Image: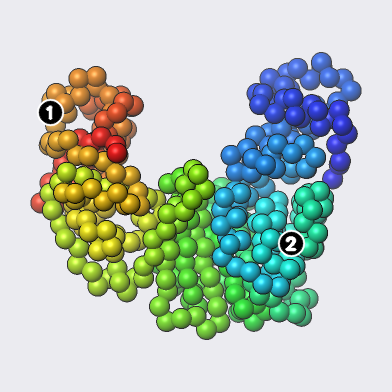
Amino acid sequence: MRIYKEDEKVFIKEHLQQDTSLLMLQAKRYPDLAVSELVQQIKARQKAMSKLPGWAKNTDLLFPANISVEQSSSEATAAFKAALVSGKLLIDLTGGFGADSYFFARSFEQVVHVEQNQELSEIANYNFNLLGADNIQTIATTAAEFLEGFTGHADVIYLDPARRGDRSEKLHLLQDCEPDVLGLLPVLLQKADNVLLKASPMLDIELAVSQLGKIAKIWVVAVQNECKEVLYMLQQNPPATIEREAINIKADGSLSNFSFTMEQEQTIVPPYSDPLVYVYEPNAAILKAGAYKTITQQYSVNKLHPNSHLYTSATLIPDFPGRTFRCLDTSRYNKKELLARLPNKQANITIRNFPDTVASIRKKTGIKEGGSMYLFFTTDMHQKPIVLYCEKI
């Protein structure tokens, strides 16, 4: 770990918005600086700008290799997790860059940041000190080794397993990630009241439920309608019914939340209808959580088809958790009919339970992306392919 001098910090700050490949070509202009090393700092900060804007702009902080930044939680999701739990001691067994530990430190008297990479552990410790998070202890060791030597008891153990393979491919199955959560689970539940696990949004929730067991609650977290993570709270003696909460963190920081259980979801018989005046697309967190039927009951909307996951109503539901559209027209999936309604041959296209891809539809019809018209290619309650012509509300 190397601490940067003032002139190096100035270089990073002045070139934070620039193309790093061009900077490397201009390296000879800065003979007194280790430009290649500084460019790596700039690259990492650029990747972190949307996730951790406050950290990315702070030239006093140190940044690790890009992969650690890519796997880091964002400020929004880290703050959300920190609001879920509190107590005396939290152990972050997969500390990484330290964003989660930093936010957890606001809710706990002490946080232990465990990271097997020595350099990354040192960087995290350096940054915590700069940020004034003096209640975080950093330990450079593996999760398994730490647990073996830990004789105390924590309020919460948090894990965000590494989801990259030997060739940097993205992984999502629990058994493929590091550390081995499934193997460590008995020990984890012995050494903490609660185990909070962050899993890939690509992991099937039902598979995770069957593999993990002992789940008390599940949160599916989206940021501005993009699903980012799924959280599982594990306990030695969880309640019989698992509550699922779908969270969408909006651009202004406010939360849209929807709670349900799979017992509710399985007993509801949703109403179906043809498209009415308004059409609704639930946010990504609700769709990932699987609240396909429950949402019809809580918001008094009809479903278009069991597998389409688009909803409709005759009167506007102003607080529906997702995107709301006014349905202007419908038609068959026919190029001539489509283009007759699109004089500028431009529209935003979404598919829901439809045999063609967006790319295939655009190729067949010549419809370009953009404009104010939204087309939903879907299947209706009569099992027929249909196109909805909508404007966003």
Q: Secondary structure at mark 1?
A: helix
- In the rendered image, the vertical position of residue 273 relative to residue 149, given as above or below: above
Figure check: 28 above or below 81: above
How many numbered marks appear? 2
Q: Measured from the top left, where is residue 83 in percent x and y?
A: 58, 62
The vertical placement of 334 against 133, above or below, is above
Instruction: Measure the C-alpha gap from mark 1 to mark 2.
Output: 60 Å
Q: Which label belongs to residue 221?
A: none
Q: Position of residue 85 (x, y in %)?
A: 60, 68
> Which residue is pictured at 68% across the width and 20% down the height?
22
- Toward which corner of the image does residue 291 lie, by quadrant? bottom left
What is the three-letter code of the residue carrying label 2?
His
Judging from the image, what secondary structure is the residue with disc 2 in?
strand
Q: Residue at x 61, y 49 (%)?
A: 75
In the rendered view of the protein, which quadrant contains the C terminus? top left
Q: Residue at x 53, y 70 (%)?
A: 233
